[in-house]
Amino acid sequence: MTFLLDISALLIAIMLLLASFNFFTLRVVSSNKSAPIEQSVSILIPMRNEAENVIELIAILKAQADLNNFEIIALDDCSIDNTKELLLEISQGNLRVIQGRELESGWLGKNYACHQLATAASGEYLVFLDADVRLNPKAISSTIESMRAWNWDFISAYPRQIAETFLERLTQPLLQWSWFSTLPLRITQKWPQPSTVVANGQFMIIKRQAYFDCDGHNGVKAQVLDDLHLARNLVRAGARGGVADGSRISHCRMYSSANQLIEGYAKSQWSAFGNPLGALLVISLLITTSILPFALGEILGF
């Protein structure tokens, strides 16, 4: 039993070492890096039953600073609330509202919506944004400026995750911990492999050429975790980029209730782990590093 405890301690030490490395080396997007962006930018928002987010989000996007040529395209994905009506009420200036087409065979809903948005866009930079993300006034220009400074073709600027309920606070940190403690991110970004790519589609910017070179969302049409698989396809196609800390310029509350959280993770986790074997390995790692030390410590009297 002490051997198992030694293995557990070793794994914990490795994970803490990786987490410490990432804490000090993870790239950070800061509004201090903002500069006027001359290239055209398309801000793309898929919306399905997002009436509670429409007014605030569009106001924030219209107020984005240092973007000299940008458009906002919102796609109503067959909402059954008044999302479309609210969008049409404020569809003036650089906001364009399009109606999502009926879902085609072989596609998942959000993937198809993003595909339609990208096809309708004209910008050199494609900004994919979830409706529940909130940006500071220079978030997009700062992120694009960071991409240019790092010579990246795409970026997943990870927003600060808002957790209010007990279940959110219990589970949401594990989402970041799962990659923060298992991958040396700065190293994997320097020598990228598709299997080590990390991405979050809440706030993602991709150069237009890189997006279409990897077949965009058409190449991940049936993937539950479209953001992760899109990022992997980008790397396969030769694009440079990855995840960065976007907590200083953006925040997001993914789920507003326990039911939403459970449904969301139940849908995505098998895909995140690749297959049942992958899930089993991850569960084994969690048990070994989080449960086994306490159980054995109790048995052995530590």
Image (cartoon, rainbow, N blue to C red):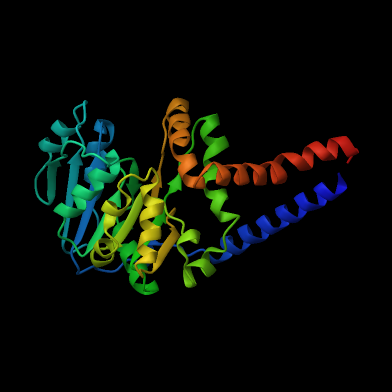
| In this view, 34 is above or below 48 | below
Quarter of the picture containing the N terminus is: top right
Q: Is residue 138 visible?
A: no
The total number of labels drawn is 0
Q: Is residue 204 left or right of residue 41?
A: right
Q: Is residue 228 left or right of residue 206?
A: right
Tell me the quarter of the picture where residue 155 sits.
Answer: bottom left
Query: Residue 198, how many percent across, how many down?
Result: 46, 56
Query: Residue 58, how many percent across, how many down?
Result: 22, 44
Query: Residue 282, how many percent across, how many down?
Result: 60, 45
Q: Is residue 126 visible?
A: yes
| In this view, 262 is above or below 162 | above
- Residue closer to the observer: 257 or 215: 215
| In this view, 175 is above or below 183 | above
Identity of the residue furthest to the right in this view: 301
Quarter of the picture containing the C terminus is: top right
Please tell me which residue is depicted at 25% across the width and 58% down the height of the picture.
126
- Residue closer to the observer: 3 or 182: 3
- Residue closer to the observer: 273 or 64: 273
Please tell me which residue is depicted at 45% across the width and 25% down the height of the picture.
259
Please tell me which residue is depicted at 55% across the width and 37% down the height of the picture.
171
Query: Residue 276, how many percent across, how many down?
Result: 54, 41
